[in-house]
Image (spheres, grey):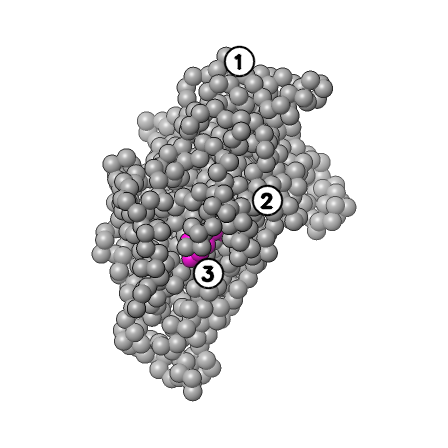
Amino acid sequence: MTTRRQMLGTAILGGGIALAARSSPATAQSGGQFGQSGLVGKLEGATLSDKVPTTFQESPLLAELVKAGKLPPVAQRLPSEPMVIQPLDGIGRYGGTWRRAFIGPGDGENGNRLVASDKPLFWDLTGSKIAPAVARGYELSPDGKSTTLFLRKGMRWSDGAPFTADDFMFWFEDLYGNKDVVPAPIPEMSAGGKPGRMVKIDETTIRFEFEAPHLLFPSMLAGDTLIGGGQAARQSGSGTFGCYAPAHYLKQFLPKYSSEAECNAKARAAGFDNWVRMLKIKHNWAINTELPTLGPWKTTRAINTPTWAMERNPYYYAVDTAGNQLPYLDSVVMTLADNTEIVNLRAMAGEYDMQERHIDLAKLPVILENRERGKYDLHLDLAFNGADTALHFNLNHIADPEIGRLLATADFRRALSLGIDREQLNETFWLGLATPGSTAPAESMPENPGAEWRKKWSVLDLAQANAMLDKLGLTKRDREGYRLRADNGQRLIIQLTVTKAFLDWPAQSQMIAQQWKKIGIFGDVRDQERALAFQRVLSGDHHIFVFGNTGSEQLFLYPHFVLPVDVSNGVLGTELARWFASNGAIGTKPTDPAVLQAMEMFRSATTLREAERNKLAQDIWKIAIDQQFSIGICGQSPAFAGVRMVSRRLGNIPGRVCIAQHCRTPGSSHPTTWYFKA
């Protein structure tokens, strides 16, 4: 029988192209069939320059405002040491609107990633080297106990107010230090089990100090962590508010600067239950158009409308090597699509200028066929995480004790994994071109535990799966062959909470549920809007959450798809994460020795050098895979935001971009340097 893979033929598979891996120039990722594709280009992009231009230019739109007296001249709006970016192919042109799609208020990451240069530090285009961003540089002390950030003198918020070290101290003292705002501490801000502190050295210097070595902290400031995700990511996520915040604007919403009664009265007048709820909305860059920001584009029409619109920040702190203030593009306009199917149809019709988010890999043949009609080019960007699709178990489900007991049992999780036909899923949803197996990162990554762990508990073995379930006491079945609960004799139903976003996870989950019939498990697929799905996850009500494990290729920067340690994402157990982050002060201590061991190992990583951390990560991965905290399906493909459709009108577009959570794809390729050709 001819497979879908064979049907693609030469339309996809062309001459071999060497691929530079994200981890280091010395490593490479074959990418299997994708790695042989002429659609996978060279990893490239804009780079930073140390040479600061002596004169500066700006967008004609801003020049008109300067002429009208509504803005200071561009030289006065830039910091004395702006970030200087060398565009990929050359200096671009000002003007134009970047058209793309979003799928609703829960799709905030769609915009967060475009303004990712609002992070304290960032990564280069390969994702392997820390680079300047909001801070012009940093210094890690020899003993690893302090990290100093050097800010840019004269830098300003989007409303023109000065951006200084006081905005960091405001975050630390008034937001992060306020239990009403941030109830639980975050692991990034502790070392050796003891909380760190922030110290203002002067107006442009901030120091993070810890009682134990915290060698990982600079990477956390650059990664997509609770401390380093950038103002936009953290503000729209309502997690920690992101290690700095606009004090001059947000103080008006805090009782410290008036009174709780006054703030609550203001909140109720604005339609909020209390001042905390009001603050969380007011600090959300995607909703509040008045909020000062640091990124290249600022929201002018909110994400909870049919059109999420952003316009250039007149005080953005970056220029190109010719002294032109960035970005080149005047605005970004995202049009609401009711579902990802509409996104794909509109993209193929040429209605978007660059769209990689929500593009369906399974539509690759028709995407290729429509390139000329839609006037776009196609790029495939390979990911380094092991699973585009993973089944994440709630290891602390308490609403239903019997379900909770099973979900917390390793052999139950292993049996469910052995009951999945990954080859069928790969053929159906990845065109047969992805890598089936566990959640382990790509073999080219330094944290990979070894090639043999790709198949551990991650191959189809119905006989073993059935035997394991029988041994757990699930021997009785109903007329349709489904297993019965041991406590009440009713049908055992395992819920899969799922949302259709990057991949067609609902359809994939339905296929998994069909496959589980052969081992007597009834899979109940609960398809929900993304924001509602994550709300259910954070409440701890879910059984299994179906999503990817993007970012996990750097375990210590993005661990929440591997271990329950991140309070902002409860896929593996919110209360377990709260216990970890608070050093046992709140939350629930794991009862499973394997979970506890892995979490303790994870906590020790902050004191280790890179080589030791990589070895520790390998050992943690072995535990996570052996215990099947998450079931991997297929990965190392472009399916998760790596099918990139680009209008031929756009310039400075890289052949391949870094697909990784810490790279804030496509942020590390500096979208500020993209432009419309004449």
Kindly report the distance in space between the C-alpha atoms of the residues bearing marks 2 and 3: 23 Å
530 shown above or below 254: below
Q: Hey, what amino acid is under mark 1?
A: Thr
x, y percent for residue 502: 47, 53
Can you identify the residue that label 1 sits on? 55
In the visual, does 306 lie left or right of 355? right
The residue depicted at 56 percent of the width and 38 percent of the height is 98
Q: Is residue 499 within the magenta segment?
A: no
Q: Does dot 3 land on a helix, a strand or a loop?
A: helix
Q: Are marks 2 and 1 in contact (CB under 8 Å)?
A: no
Mark carried by residue 334: 2
Can you identify the residue that label 3 sits on? 505
Callout 2 crowding tier (Cα within 10 Å): few <14, some 14–19, many ≥20: many
Q: Does dot 1 land on a helix, a strand or a loop?
A: loop
The magenta region covers 358-364
294 shown above or below 631: above
x, y percent for residue 411: 32, 69
Q: Is residue 360 within the magenta segment?
A: yes
